[in-house]
Amino acid sequence: MTNILIATHNLNKRKEIKTLLKDFSNIKVLSLDDIKIDPPRIVEDGKTFRQNAVKKAVITSQFVDGLVLADDSGLVLDILGGKPGVRSARFARKHATDIENNKKLLKLLEKMDGEKRAAKFVCHITLATKGKLLENFEGVIWGMITKKGRGQNGFGYDPIFVPDGYNKTFAQMTAAYKNKISHRALALKQLKEHIQKYIN
Amino acid sequence: MTNILIATHNLNKRKEIKTLLKDFSNIKVLSLDDIKIDPPRIVEDGKTFRQNAVKKAVITSQFVDGLVLADDSGLVLDILGGKPGVRSARFARKHATDIENNKKLLKLLEKMDGEKRAAKFVCHITLATKGKLLENFEGVIWGMITKKGRGQNGFGYDPIFVPDGYNKTFAQMTAAYKNKISHRALALKQLKEHIQKYIN
């Protein structure tokens, strides 16, 4: 049995990752609440998802045994030069609510149509152990930003994102369905295919 | 039987895509050489892989029946602000050889170590029909740029890219192996899971 610690304080992300990894019988998934020591809280000041995820995973893995998994993710729009990007959670302001962030994005895109509303959700996952980076995985799902919010499920920009090939926003899908197709699911699917080599 | 046209003039990419799609019994994979009409040659002037792939797929699909698949892909380094990016094939100069491009990149990274040599290969695939965009897929594989080239297989930056979790460069792997783990394989795996809904 190998421990894998999910180094995120974000409850929603943690829940999604735990659900997506639950079918591994030889891995015990832990979160920061499950361990006795309290690794330093990492400042997410990277310019890219990778920089943040690597920092979180590598530093945290110096303080715990076993594998550490860190996630950094967000929404990226080409038309906005990559924004909200690494600032997805604090796009409107520091400690912004999801509603504030969604509102700001809709306002910025107010006069834009078609291809200009294209957006991708990116999830970067880094696996580390004993202060050493092991592997990185990235999941991407493309879609369109709606004209207004729809749906009550999910979190973040889910109410205003319709993935390509669908009519529903992420927030209109059940958690179980979103967990099958999301950027986080795509990244974790890759992790699952590669993680066995790090398990005793 | 549905036709799917691969809208790329790049022989290497076309070969990889054909190989990766060969197990579909209800899809006939065609390349630009297989069709009678000659769709306009698209100028790849997009700022992102997506912009180029969408342009190629959508415009080409106005001239042929069935589905059209376009690919845009390349190497991205955070330390270089995303370069070589959409200019991967012409990084050193217009019509540059792979050797020239590799040499330029190695020179730029000469004094850099560790995390600074991190790079990802990105493959963006767009599916379109009758001038209409259907869906986008993106595959990403992270790795490190070596200090010098190794291996004879593959093309582009393959000799100087070692994917995370491996010791070999892409150019040291067999085509069959690279086709299992590459960015293009990851994008096409998603395409395969979604394409059935567009097939009569």
Image (cartoon, coloured by chain):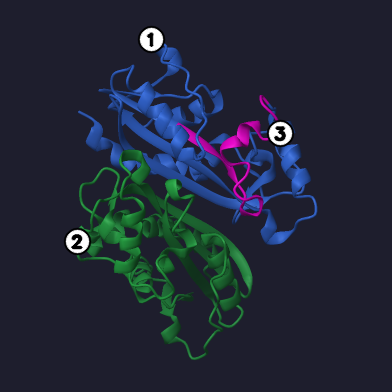
Chain colours: A blue, B green
Residue at position x 59%, y 43% from top? A75
x, y percent for residue B10: 40, 75
Quadrant of the image occupied by residue B179? bottom left
Give, as a three-letter code, the residue at label 2: Gly
Chain where mark 3 sits:
A
Give, as a three-letter code, the residue at label 1: Ile
Instruction: Give the structural element (helix, strand or loop) at label 3.
Output: loop
Instruction: Give the structural element (helix, strand or loop) at label 1.
Output: loop
- Tell which of B116 and B166 is nearer to you: B116
Mark 3 to mark 1: distance in Å? 34 Å
Reading the image, the residue beneath label 2 is: B151
Reading the image, the residue beneath label 1 is: A37
Q: Residue A92, which numbered label? A: 3
What stretch of residues is rendered in magenta?
Answer: A71-95
Chain where mark 2 sits:
B
Q: Nearer the viewer, mark 2 or mark 1?
A: 2
Name the residue at the top extreme: A36
Quadrant of the image occupied by residue A11? top right
Report if the CB atoms under discs 2 and 1 are less than 8 Å apart: no
Report if the CB atoms under discs 3 and 1 are less than 8 Å apart: no
x, y percent for residue B6: 45, 74
Q: Is residue A109 left or right of residue A22?
A: right
- Tell which of A47 and B39 is nearer to you: A47
Give, as a three-letter code, the residue at label 3: Ala
User: How many marks on residues?
Assistant: 3
Chain where mark 1 sits:
A
Q: Earlier in the sequence, mark 3 or mark 1?
A: 1
Mark 2 to mark 1: distance in Å? 45 Å
Pointer 1 local density, CA inside 10 Å: few below 14, some 14–19, many at least 20: few
Q: Are marks 3 and 1 on the same chain?
A: yes
